[in-house]
Image (tube, rainbow, N blue to C red):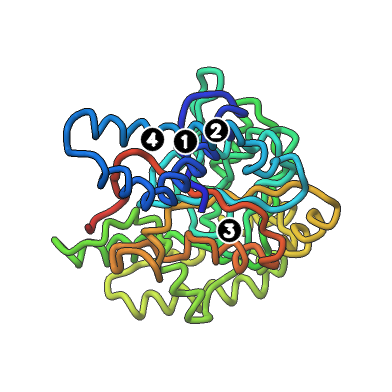
């Protein structure tokens, strides 16, 4: 991973700064043995400590002077990935917003509306939960990959918010036909399960992400592409809703009202629905630059994080391959964002 320290500098400075920190960290790490030798030869006086600090600074400065040789240019075709390397809130969205100006396609590959990225442009605050932050680059298209779970009411609300801000998105947003849907009853179940845990709660956002992935793994979930066949969608939805009412005592779902809403938005959603696996790989073949915006962070990964205090997906590098449908050979750069102190999203250590 290349570690990125968030700063308020310009795009080029940020990219350079990211590489500098990475390279600097690598240099410091690789020179530990050298430093041990220096320390061994000097005493523990202030002068000795200052000499050690000076040596490490020199190493970092040496790397900074060779950035062009160490950092691949973002203007070349390929797939680059920005991930959170800690427990979230490292500033991924802001970094992606800056970097995305040099990309043709920006994508989300995992998680759902439990992500939260806030971008301020010209004094206007934009909050994104499902849309990639790259939507603010009017020349870029945005992909919601098959690994994402989508709460359509929230998704459409984000799009409406863009329109109110004067940001054109028509023809620029593509939803995977394989992405699973998050329904309101998923969110109700999420909240009920969290409340039941009491003092041992996970710290979920109660956005229904876990229950939606549970439906996906149980193979009774409903996918975005199902909306193109209303009869099929209705049958799948009714079966899923009835299953949840049987499984969770006291849960009530107005099935007819829910179906009425989804029928009203089916055409609008279908216009954005494509095979994003085919679309993304075709863009790659055409030499387009693709940026993947990671959600959550590595230490919240369902497999590699601080389990059970984790999210329900894989916000690490593996999700790029499975959640976007691309070969690992096509991934060029992986950039992990960190900050100088640690906080975490949700409960747990």
Write down the residue under mark 1.
60
- How many C-alpha atoms fall within 10 Å of the one at disc 2: few (<14), some, or many (≥20)? some
- Tag 4, which secondary structure? helix
Of the residues under marks 3 and 1, which one precedes in the sequence?
1
Query: Of circles 3 and 4, which is in front?
Result: 4
Residue 4 location (% of width, % of height): 48, 41
Residue 292 location (% of width, % of height): 61, 51
Query: Of circles 4 and 2, which is in front?
Result: 4
Quarter where residue 58 is shown: top left
Tell me how far mark 1 sits from mark 4, CA to CA: 9 Å
Query: Residue, x 25% and y 47% (percent of image)?
Result: 40
Of the residues under marks 2 and 3, which one precedes in the sequence?
2
Of the residues under marks 3 and 4, which one precedes in the sequence?
4
- How many C-alpha atoms fall within 10 Å of the one at disc 3: few (<14), some, or many (≥20)? many
- How many C-alpha atoms fall within 10 Å of the one at disc 4: few (<14), some, or many (≥20)? some
Query: Of circles 1 and 4, which is in front?
Result: 4
Of the residues under marks 4 and 2, which one precedes in the sequence?
4
Numbered label attached to residue 64: 2
Write down the residue under mark 4.
55
Tell me how far mark 1 sits from mark 2, CA to CA: 6 Å
Write down the residue under mark 3.
109
- Tag 1, which secondary structure? helix
Query: Residue, x 38% and y 35% (percent of image)?
Result: 55
**Above or below, comparing residue 291 to residue 13 in the picture:** below
Does the CB distance between marks 3 and 4 fall below 8 Å? no
Does the CB distance between marks 1 and 2 fall below 8 Å? yes
**Above or below, comparing residue 293 to residue 249 in the picture:** above
């Amino acid at each position: 991973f290349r570690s990125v320290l968030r700063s308020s500098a310009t795009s080029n400075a940020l990219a350079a700064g990211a590489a500098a920190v990475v390279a600097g960290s690598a240099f410091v790490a690789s020179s530990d043995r050298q430093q041990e030798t220096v320390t061994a030869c000097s005493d523990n006086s202030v002068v000795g400590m200052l000499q050690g600090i000076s040596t490490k600074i020199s190493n970092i400065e040496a790397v900074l002077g060779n950035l062009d040789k160490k950092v691949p240019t973002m203007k070349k075709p390929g797939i680059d990935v920005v991930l959170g390397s800690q427990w979230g809130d490292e500033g991924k969205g802001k970094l992606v917003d800056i970097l995305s100006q040099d990309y043709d396609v920006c994508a989300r590959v995992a998680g759902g509306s439990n992500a939260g990225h806030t971008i301020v442009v010209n004094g206007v605050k934009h909050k994104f939960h499902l849309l990639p932050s790259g939507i603010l680059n009017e020349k870029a298209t945005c992909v919601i990959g098959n690994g994402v779970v989508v709460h359509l009411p929230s998704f459409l609300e984000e799009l409406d918010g863009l329109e109110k801000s004067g940001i054109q998105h028509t023809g620029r947003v593509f939803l995977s036909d394989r992405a699973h849907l998050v329904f309101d009853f998923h969110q109700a179940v999420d909240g009920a399960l969290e409340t039941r845990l009491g003092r041992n709660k996970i710290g979920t956002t109660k956005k229904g992400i876990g229950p939606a992935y549970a439906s996906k793994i149980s193979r009774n979930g409903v996918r975005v592409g199902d909306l193109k066949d209303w009869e099929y969608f209705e049958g799948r939805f009714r079966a899923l809703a009835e299953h949840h009412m049987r499984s969770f005592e006291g849960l009530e779902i107005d099935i007819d009202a829910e179906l009425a809403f989804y029928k009203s938005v089916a055409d609008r959603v279908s216009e954005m629905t494509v095979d994003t696996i085919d679309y993304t790989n075709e863009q790659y073949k055409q030499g387009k630059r693709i940026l993947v915006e990671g959600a959550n962070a590595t230490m919240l990964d369902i497999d590699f994080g601080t389990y059970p205090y984790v999210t329900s997906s894989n916000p690490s590098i593996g999700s790029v391959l499975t959640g976007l449908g691309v070969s690992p050979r096509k991934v060029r750069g992986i950039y992990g964002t960190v900050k100088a102190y640690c906080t975490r999203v949700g409960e747990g250590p």
